[in-house]
Amino acid sequence: MLAQTNTSTGAPDTNTSPSSTSPGDIVDLSAYDDEQVRLMGEMCIVLDNNDKAIGAASKKTCHQMSNISKGMVHRAFSVFLFNSKNELLLQQRAVEKITFPECFTNTCCSHPLATEAELDEEDQIGVKRAAQRKLEHELGIPADQVPLDRFQYLTRIHYVAPSDGVWGEHEIDYILFIRADVDLNVNANEVMSVKYVAMDELKQMIADADKNGTKLTPWFRLIDESFLYKWWANLDNLEPFKDHATIHRLN
């Protein structure tokens, strides 16, 4: 297991008591949704800029701009799920979400946790386990409809993005594609709406987003602008597009 990271030094913290508060963990959560506050206690994987795991810190700590500005970065994943008609499943994040509420984004975006199962880097199995877990949690998709061996890991992106003056993201994000026809049972505390879109529909939606007041997550915009459509056009043969050596620095 990883040691908890001290946000004032970036080094592993030997005081890992659940009740302890790191120096960078300063934001009052009393005004936020109770369930989303609970989830802020989950322990994320803290990284160096080359995706080496160097510690663990709470989701709350990892997403505070005060810590991001010091260089704190954590591991994440973004799932793009396509049905048998090659339509992409989008979600709109719930208003209860603490970061990027009401934003449209790809199917599922979250974090592997600092647990033995999700730290496992062999064949990116830890990230895939986390993706399967969160697809069930957010969208109610049964695990047997998204088997681990069906996820295709394409590459990683590294980006930083503020959500507001308090919260933001600084992630090395694993991009996972999967094609499956799935049953949905949406968790309303996580997701306020879902829809499948064809490629041309998404292009139009994003082109009109500012005019229509449609909010999009920053990582979804970056992936859309940089990679998405060439990958989408080649769902039947993604092997030539897999780049596991590169971490794409997108901003």
Image (cartoon, rainbow, N blue to C red):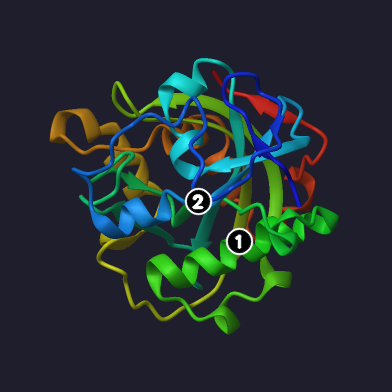
Residue 7, by quadrant, is top right
**Who's the residue at 21% across and 38% down the image?**
214
Vertical relation: 241 (above or below) 5? below
Residue 104 placement (x, y as % from top left): 31, 46
Vertical relation: 42 (above or below) 117? above
**Who's the residue at 42% across and 23% down the image?**
65
Mark earlier in primary sequence (1, 2) = 2
Q: Quickly name the residue at label 2.
A: 110
- Who is closer to the viewer here, 122 or 156? 122
Amino acid at the residue labelled 1: Ala
- Who is closer to the viewer here, 118 or 105? 118
Vertical relation: 165 (above or below) 229? above
In this image, 1 relative to 187: left or right?
A: right
Q: Quickly name the residue at label 1.
A: 130
**Who's the residue at 53% across and 50% down the image?**
18
Crowd band around label 1 with a 10 angstrom C-alpha radius: few (<14), some (14–19), many (20+): many
Residue 17 visible, this orientation: yes
In this image, 25 relative to 202: left or right?
A: right
SS class, disc 2: strand
In this image, 15 relative to 32: left or right?
A: right
**Who's the residue at 72% across and 27% down the image?**
48
**Location of the C terminus (image quadrant):** top right
Residue 205 placement (x, y as % from top left): 28, 42
Vertical relation: 19 (above or below) 209? below
SS class, disc 1: helix
Crowd band around label 2 with a 10 angstrom C-alpha radius: few (<14), some (14–19), many (20+): some
Asked whether the residues under the numbered discs 1 and 2 touch, taking CB atoms below 8 Å apart as contact, a structural biologist would say: yes
- Who is closer to the viewer here, 117 or 218? 117
Q: CA distance from mark 1 to mark 2?
A: 8 Å
Amino acid at the residue labelled 2: Ser
Residue 77 visible, this orientation: no
Residue 40 placement (x, y as % from top left): 42, 48
